[in-house]
Image (spheres, rainbow, N blue to C red):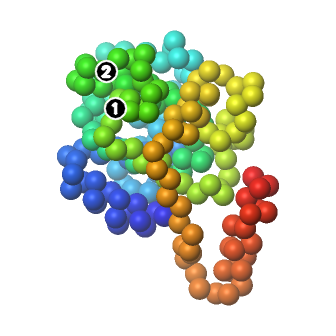
């Protein structure tokens, strides 16, 4: 997956767009993806003490300037390790990006969560990841966790993720050729293993 993103997806996007955004949910995931990657927290100007409540996500002039340099004029966005991204963070990044792009693209903030308006109506958004990887901590914050008892922000983030137009799944990707490791991988990726997640 990482090789395809590094060698195919990003170079192709760079042909069509003068600016692309590359993000991951953590510094470790960012280091494994691409040298230009930011964490989604950083790109959304989220500090550890910041609230994910919608009313608290408006941006300041200083944030708008910083975001202007990063995503206001971007045509594409690739987010890696999406399954480790919390639904609230996904929502916060989408809303703050809409605020940052509002004036340039004449966006209506109230429509930011509609499918064609996600992430400030960016032309291309790819959420990449392995559905068998560990979810964020706690697991209840995951984009695919049960919505029962979750916040409105969580529900909106999960809905945005569920409304993506296309889903591509790799079936035969592995980094090794040994029969024992391949057998383990097949067992891990079988229906019974997936059902336990």
Question: Hey, which quadrant is residue 99 in on the image?
Answer: top left
**Residue at x-position 27% and y-position 59%:** 12
Crowd tier of the residue under label 1, counting other residues whose Cα lies within 10 Å: few below 14, some 14–19, many 20 or above: many
Name the residue tied to disc 2.
107
Element type where label 1 sits in the image: helix
Q: Residue at x 53, y 66 (%)?
A: 170
Q: Is residue 12 above or below residue 43?
A: below
* Camera-side residue of 62 and 96: 96
Seen at 72% across and 36% down, the residue is: 146
Density class for disc 2 (Cα within 10 Å; few <14, some 14-19, many ≥20) is some
Secondary structure of the residue carrying numbered label 2: loop
Examine the rendered structure and indicate whether residue 81 appears above or below residue 40. Answer: below
The part of the image, by quadrant, that contains residue 186 is bottom right
Depth check, front residue: 192 or 47: 192
Is residue 195 rendered to the left or right of residue 19? right
The number of callouts visible is 2
Residue 28 pos. (x, y %): 53, 52
Work out whether residue 101 can be spotted. Answer: yes
- Residue drawn at x 48%, y 18% as measured from the top left: 57
User: Is residue 64 visible from the viewing direction of this image?
Assistant: no
Q: CA distance from mark 1 to mark 2?
A: 8 Å
Q: Position of residue 188 (x, y in %)?
A: 72, 68
| Residue wearing tag 1 | 121
* Residue closer to the observer: 59 or 91: 91
Labelled pair 1, 2 in contact (Cβ < 8 Å): yes
Q: Residue furthest top?
A: 55
Q: Earlier in the sequence, mark 1 or mark 2?
A: 2
């Amino acid at each position: 997956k990482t090789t395809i993103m590094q060698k195919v997806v990003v170079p192709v996007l760079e042909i069509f767009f003068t600016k692309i955004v590359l993000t991951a949910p953590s510094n470790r995931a960012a280091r494994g993806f691409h040298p230009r990657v930011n964490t989604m927290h950083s790109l959304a100007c989220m500090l550890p003490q910041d609230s994910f409540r919608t009313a608290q996500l408006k941006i300041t002039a200083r944030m708008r300037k910083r975001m202007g340099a990063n995503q206001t004029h971007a045509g594409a966005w690739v987010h890696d390790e999406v399954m480790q991204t919390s639904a609230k963070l996904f929502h916060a990044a989408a809303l703050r990006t809409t605020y940052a792009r509002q004036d340039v693209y004449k966006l209506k903030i109230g429509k930011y969560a509609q499918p064609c308006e996600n992430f400030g109506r960016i032309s291309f958004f790819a959420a990449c990841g392995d559905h068998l990887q560990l979810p964020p901590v706690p697991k209840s914050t995951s984009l695919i966790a049960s919505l029962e008892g979750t916040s409105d922000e969580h529900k909106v983030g999960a809905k945005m993720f569920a409304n993506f137009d296309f889903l591509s799944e790799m079936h035969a990707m592995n980094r090794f050729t040994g029969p024992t490791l391949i057998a383990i991988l097949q067992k891990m990726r079988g229906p019974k293993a997936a059902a336990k997640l």
